[in-house]
Image: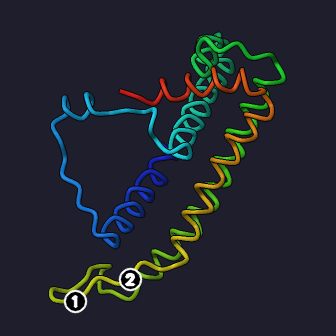
């Protein structure tokens, strides 16, 4: 539930960037979307953002179950699937995921303030008929680049912690978990 605002914000931010870039998206039928979805070509920052969010969510649910006296191991196992990580690697993964998500939230708060300040210049946050859309504030682009960098740095930290061979296996797992 607490990620709902972040997801809405990111949708708004991405939509703004698409409008500024002149990109128009038309929805495809669901079956066609799933057939055409190739998660191996997703930008790394997107793949790892979704994975870190999934990991934090599953770990949070596991903690809640454990607080209720129920086992949370099954949920924790879903985070890493068949990838065998030792305790140190698992701790690094959990720590890096939480740190990246926290840093991204901090950037989202800054971006939300810039967006809110921009909305304040328009009656009820809307552009009047015939009025041109405002330029995307340069600060938002800088914040988005910083946000992307957070997840790329997280990915790189995992690569250093795991080593190249284990990281390659882990990366394949990450990409397989974010698909349909």
Neighbourhood count class around disc 1 (C-alpha, 10 Å): few under 14, some 14–19, many 20 upward: few
Q: Quadrant of the C terminus?
A: top left
Which callout, 1 or 2, points to the residue nearer the camera? 2
Q: Is 43 situated left or right of 129 in this image?
A: right
Going 42% across and 33% down the picture, which residue do you hit?
39
Is there a contact, CB below 8 Å, between mark 1 and mark 2? no
In the image, residue 78 sits, relative to residue 94, either above or below, namely above
Q: Is 117 situated left or right of 74 in this image?
A: left
Residue corresponding to mark 2: 135
Tag 1 secondary structure: loop
Q: CA distance from mark 1 to mark 2?
A: 12 Å
The image quadrant that residue 9 belongs to is bottom left
In the image, residue 122 sits, relative to residue 33, either above or below, namely below
Give percent across and percent down for residue 112: 51, 68
Tag 2 secondary structure: loop
**Display coloring:** rainbow
The image quadrant that residue 84 belongs to is top right
Most foreground residue, 149 or 13:
149
Neighbourhood count class around disc 2 (C-alpha, 10 Å): few under 14, some 14–19, many 20 upward: few
Going 64% across and 60% down the picture, which residue do you hit?
106
Give percent across and percent down for residue 175: 50, 29
Q: For the view shown, which residue lies furthest in the right direction? A: 88
Most foreground residue, 23 or 50:
23
Q: Is 43 situated left or right of 135 in this image?
A: right
In the image, residue 104 sits, relative to residue 56, either above or below, namely below
The image quadrant that residue 53 belongs to is top right
Most foreground residue, 71 or 76:
76
Going 62% across and 14% down the picture, which residue do you hit?
77
Residue corresponding to mark 1: 131
């Amino acid at each position: 539930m607490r990620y709902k605002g972040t997801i809405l914000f990111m949708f708004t931010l991405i939509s703004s960037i698409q409008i500024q870039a002149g990109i128009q998206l038309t929805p495809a039928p669901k079956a066609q979307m799933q057939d055409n979805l190739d998660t191996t070509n997703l930008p790394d920052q997107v793949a790892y953002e979704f994975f870190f969010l999934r990991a934090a969510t599953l770990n949070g649910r596991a903690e809640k179950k454990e607080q209720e006296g129920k086992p949370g191991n099954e949920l924790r196992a879903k985070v890493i699937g068949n990838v065998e990580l030792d305790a140190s690697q698992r701790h690094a993964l959990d720590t890096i995921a939480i740190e990246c998500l926290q840093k991204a939230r901090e950037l989202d708060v800054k971006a939300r303030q810039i967006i809110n300040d921009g909305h304040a210049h328009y009656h009820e946050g809307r552009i009047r008929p015939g009025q041109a859309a405002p330029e995307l504030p340069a600060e938002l682009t800088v914040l988005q680049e910083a946000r992307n960098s957070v997840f790329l740095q997280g990915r790189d930290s995992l690569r250093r912690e795991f080593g190249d061979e284990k990281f390659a296996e882990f990366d394949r797992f990450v990409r397989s978990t974010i698909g349909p």
